[in-house]
Amino acid sequence: MVESHQTAVKTKCPACGGSVPAGKYRCLKCGIYFCSKCRIRLAKRDRQCQCVNQQCDDYGKLICYNCTVKVAEEKLIPVKIGDSLEIALLTPLYISPIVGLVAGKMSEFGIGVLATLASYPVLAVLIFTGCLMARKKSYTVVRNCCADCRQPVQQK
C-alpha cells in the first residue's frame, strides 16, 4: 500500500497532542496556532510573523517573534547638492577679496588681484567638498528577518 506524501511525516500538536502534518502551524483538532519552527503555542496577542520571500521554505508560514533574527542595515541620508553648490559659490565671493587685500598690503597691488582671482576657485572647491562631507550621514535600521533567508518578515 502506498502512503500519501502528506501523511508520511507528522508531528504532535503542542496543546492537544493530536497529529499535525509537518510544517503546518494550525491544529485541525483543537484549532490553535503555533510557530512552524519551534512549535510553541501562539495566542492572538503574541507577536506573529510570516516570511514574505517566495523562494524561502518558510514562505507564508507562521513564525513566532523569537524565531526571527534581527538584521542591522545602514542607510544613507540623501544629500542635496543644490544647497552645497550655492554655499560653495557665494562664500568665496566674500572671502577671496579679503585674501586679496591681505596679499596686496603685504606686497604689491598686482599680487593682491592675482591672489583674489586664484583664491576664489580654490576656496569654492574646498568649501563644496567640505559641505558634502559634512552632509554624508547615515542611520541604522534594525529589522526582524526570517532565520533561513534573512529577508524582512511581515508582522501579523
Image (spheres, helix red, strand yellow):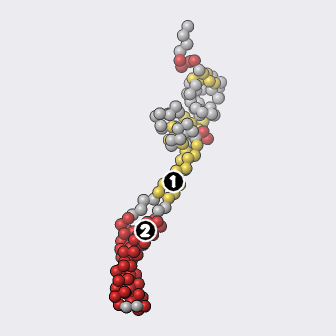
Q: Amino acid at mark 2?
A: Thr
Image position of 1 with respect to 130: above or below: above
Q: Nearer the viewer, residue 24 or 17?
A: 24
Picture residue at 48% right of the left edge, 38% below the top: 52
Q: Nearer the N terminus, badge 1 or badge 2?
A: 1
Question: Is residue 27 at least partly visible in the picture?
Answer: yes
Residue tagged 1: 74
Residue 20 image offset from top left, x and y in percent: 59, 23
Q: Nearer the viewer, residue 149 or 4?
A: 149
Residue 75 image offset from top left, x and y in percent: 48, 54
Picture residue at 45% right of the left edge, 59% below the top: 77
Image position of 61 with respect to 109: above or below: above
Residue tagged 2: 129
Picture residue at 36% right of the left edge, 74% below the top: 121
Q: Nearer the viewer, mark 1 or mark 2?
A: 2
Image position of 110 with respect to 52: above or below: below
- The answer for how far apart the CA atoms under marks 1 and 2 are is 23 Å
Residue 56 image offset from top left, x and y in percent: 50, 34
Cβ–Cβ below 8 Å for labels 1 and 2? no
Q: Amino acid at mark 1?
A: Glu
Picture residue at 53% right of the left edge, 17% below the top: 5
